[in-house]
Structures are given as C-alpha cells and as structure tokens.
Amino acid sequence: MQLQERINAFTQLGTFLGDWSQKMDDPILLRAKAQNAWFTLDNLKFALESWSLALTEANLQKWTDSYSFEESGASKTVAIVMAGNIPLVGFHDFVTVLISGHKVLAKLSSNDKVLLPFLAEKLIALEPKFEGCIQFTEGKLEGFDAVIATGSNNTARYFDYYFGKYPNIIRKNRNSVAVLTGKESKEQMEALAVDVFQYFGLGCRNVSKIYLPEDYDFDAFFNGMFSWKDIINNDKYINNYDYNKAVYLMSDIALLDNEFMLLKEDTQFSSPIAVVFYERYQNLDNLREMLQDNAGNIQCIVGQSGLEGEIDFGEAQTPQLWDYADGVDTIKFLLEL
C-alpha cells in the first residue's frame, strides 16, 4: 500500500469521526461509557471531535511530508501496549504505526477496549488493504519486531525488563504545567480551565500544576475555573474531591478550596484528581532553568510567559499529529526499524 492510499484512508476516517461525534446515542459509544465511568459522553464527544480535526488531508500531508518513506513493502510488526486513562489515548501510536507502513499488534487497556477495535474495523472497511495489518491480543505479546509501551513509572520498569532487547519507546508518568504571570485575560483563564478539567484531569497533557508570581491574586484564577463548576456533579469526581480534601484536612495541610477543586502548594508535578498543585516563582529566568532541569517530568507547558516551547491556553488537549508524546519522534523511530 502506498503512502497516499494510507493518507486517503485516514482522511476518510477523520470525516467519519466528525460524523460519529454527533451521534452520542450510538451503541458503541454507550458501551464505552458503560465500561469506564470516566468516559462520559462529553469526553467521548471531545475525543472524537479532536481526532476528526487532526485527521484532515492537509494535516496528514504536512505531517508526512517531513519524512522520507520507503515504499519497499518490508513492514515490521510493532507491538503497542496502550494506556486507558482517557478515550483513545493510544490512537496516535496506532495511526503512526500504520501511516509508517508497519503492522499493529495492540494490547488494549482493560479501561478502553471498545473504541479502537471498532475504529480498526471501520478503517479496514474504508481501505481493505489494511486487512492483516491490525491485530489485537489479550494474551502474551508474541511475534513482534518493536514495541511502543505506555504506562506508569512503576510499569515502565517491567516494560524495560520484558522489552529491553527490542527497539522500543517506553513512556512513563508525565504531567503538564501552566505558567501564569498575573496578566492573563478572563478568556485565557477559562481556556486554562479546559486544560485542567478536560477528561477530569486524567491525561498527561492535563495541567496538574501551576506556577505563579509571588504576588499573584488567586481571584482571576478561580473566576476562570468557575466555568467548569458542574464537574462536581460527576460521582467519581466528587468522591475523589471529598477523599482528597479529607486526607489533607486531617493532616492539617493548608488548602485553597472553591468547592469543586483544591489548590495545594507543592513542589511535585503529579497531583491527585480534583487537586491542582501550585508553586510560586521569583523570576522567569529561574523558573526556566528549573523547568529545563525537570523536563523528564513535563509533557507540555501552557502559558504566554515567553518560555520556550509553550503552548497557548486551551490547547493542551488538542495536540497536532506532529506533537509527539514525551518529545520522542515516533515516525522517525518507526522508519529506522
């Protein structure tokens, strides 16, 4: 199969995802929601719409034009061990392996086993040449040439042990941060609320920590967050909010609380659900150096403070195809197999 044929197929799949996002009573989506209570219909709709916007012919052409594809037909089988924290979290790896001309052997998370097999069937229906290029397994991974595995810092140790002899990309815990200057507009703060709360904060691109000037006034921040106040009506979210609040209060830990999220001063990056950590900075030069030293813990930096590599408020959960997790160029890795 030629690259253009693969691009055409994924372009059609993107169109389908856009149409599908308008049919939230679809049985497949209802099954996904029933399997994982974090997969609300709003979050499923957001995921489908985001992928529909990403998988356009223009985006796919721009993405692939940066590489030299060899159409030799000598494809490899790439095992993908997928996470399941947000809907279709492993879809980028799935797309990347196939667009590179390789075959997918996917091991799905028990938390997200409905959506991707359905989309794989749809892709094959759109382009039958993908038949035989996609396989799912629930058992031991066997018969593969390379591995892309996503998990926690703990599971990464096991991935290193089992897959270390193969060409691999092994992803660990990462979190995203926001840098505020105190000059942000109301609209920017409301956009930041999307970066914080979308998917209930479960994704590695969710902002779990904010950096603030020493004299920062929290009113602007909380006013922006207020646009997501209804998140507290989700049973799983409010259970986490109540639990974390109780634990902190019993430990006499100071909190800022707006009744649907907690702010805790902390030097760590990974905050619990319904909690955002914050830390104050003296100047941006020192903050820049600190963030560079901790680059291995950070997925993306949200803000308009002038720091290198920042993305704008509200864009954390809508990465482009060429925005690679952990900054590792997955297509380059695959083309060198």
Image: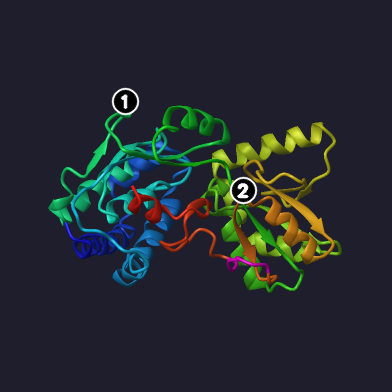
Closer to the N terminus: mark 2 or mark 1?
A: 1
Classify 141 as above or below 104: above
> Disc 2 designates what residue?
296
The residue that appears at 23% across and 62% down in the rendered structure is 3
The residue that appears at 38% across and 49% down in the rendered structure is 93
Which secondary structure lies at badge 2? helix
Callout 1, which amino acid?
Answer: Gly
Which secondary structure lies at badge 1? loop
Residue 280 picture location, percent across and down: 81, 57
Closest to the camera, between mark 2 and mark 1, is 2
Viewer-nearest residue: 106 or 334: 334
Q: Is residue 312 magenta?
A: yes
Q: Main secondary structure of the magenta part?
A: loop
Residue 139 picture location, percent across and down: 31, 25
| Span highlighted in magenta in the image | 307-313
Distance in Å between CA atoms under marks 2 and 1: 31 Å
Classify 259 as above or below 245: below
Horizontally, is 273 left or right of 215 in the view? left
Viewer-nearest residue: 230 or 209: 209
Callout 2, which amino acid?
Answer: Gly
> Disc 1 designates what residue?
139
Viewer-nearest residue: 326 or 174: 326
> Around disc 2, counting alpha carbons within 10 Å, would you say few (fewer than 14), some (14 to 19), or many (20 or more)?
some
Residue 47 picture location, percent across and down: 41, 55
Residue 240 picture location, percent across and down: 62, 38
